[in-house]
Image (cartoon, rainbow, N blue to C red):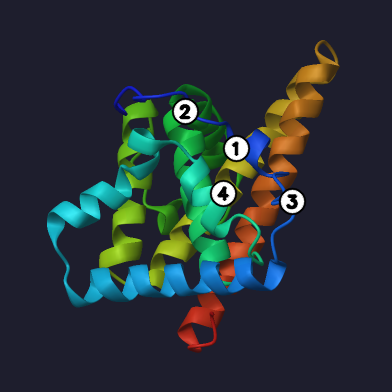
Amino acid sequence: MSAEFSKPVRRPSETFDRLFAGADPAEISRAAHATATALLARVRHEPDAGVVERLVSFTASHGIDDIAELWSQSPARSLPGSLWRLYLVQLAIHDDPRTASLLYQRGSAELHSADTVVAGAPAPAGPDELVALIDTILRGAFTGDYAVALDRTAAFCRVQASGATHLADDYEPTEPARASELTTRALRLSAFAADLTAAARLWRRESLD
């Protein structure tokens, strides 16, 4: 299970719409791309286990705001934009692993595709297992094939999106507000999956920047 956050952590839904008022968008874009590229290059050049673990546990120690300021406004299908989405998926699982597990297990039962195999979660995938899975995937983004990490996260998102969609159908007759929340979550997860898959293709073509 994930460690206790050392300070309040801003939820993903609060950071999606953050704006950097008064800042030069071009400067923000240049900084985002420069930091993302330098980070990956440095870790790959000197794969120190301690550095990797600090990056994997970054949001647990520091929250999401520091990363948001770097990468949240970057295009989804860019290096900083894809890193931002990897961290958001990780935070969502760490923040509520039980719901993540519920969605994943339902999606695994309903989705007839290779996504469960690609994501690599054990069966059954409980809360602890999903926390370990997303940390392993993020670790692989820094030390292994970045495209594989993106593809695994995209597959995970598709499984969860399926689970959220089917649970929304279940709740619709009795709890329409809950059904609406789940539908919104499914749409967001599906969009993440599409963007991460596209980013993986660009990375393989050496065109993700």
**Residue 195 located left or right of residue 61:** right
For label 4, the SS is helix
Camera-near label (3 vs 1) is: 3
Residue 139 in the image: x percent, y percent? 29, 56
Looking at marks 4 and 2 on the same chain, the residue that comes earlier in the sequence is marked by 2
Q: Looking at the rendering, in which quadrant would you find the C terminus?
A: bottom right
Q: Residues within 10 Å of mark 2 (few under 14, many from 20)?
A: some
Between 111 and 81, which is closer to the camera in this rendering?
A: 81
Quickly name the residue at label 4: 157
Amino acid bearing label 1: Pro
Q: Is residue 103 above or below residue 75?
A: above
Q: Is residue 98 above or below residue 204?
A: above
| Badge 4 vs badge 2, beta-carbon distance below 8 Å | no
Residue 180 in the image: x percent, y percent? 81, 27
For label 2, the SS is helix
Quickly name the residue at label 1: 12
Q: Residues within 10 Å of mark 3 (few under 14, many from 20)?
A: few
Quickly name the residue at label 2: 95
Residue drawn at x 56%, y 56% is 113
Residue drawn at x 74%, y 22% is 170
Quickly name the residue at label 3: 21
Between 202 and 19, which is closer to the camera in this rendering?
A: 19
| Badge 4 vs badge 3, beta-carbon distance below 8 Å | no
Residue 99 in the image: x percent, y percent? 53, 25
Camera-near label (1 vs 2) is: 1
Tag count in the figure?
A: 4
Amino acid bearing label 2: Asp
CA distance for labels 4 and 2: 16 Å
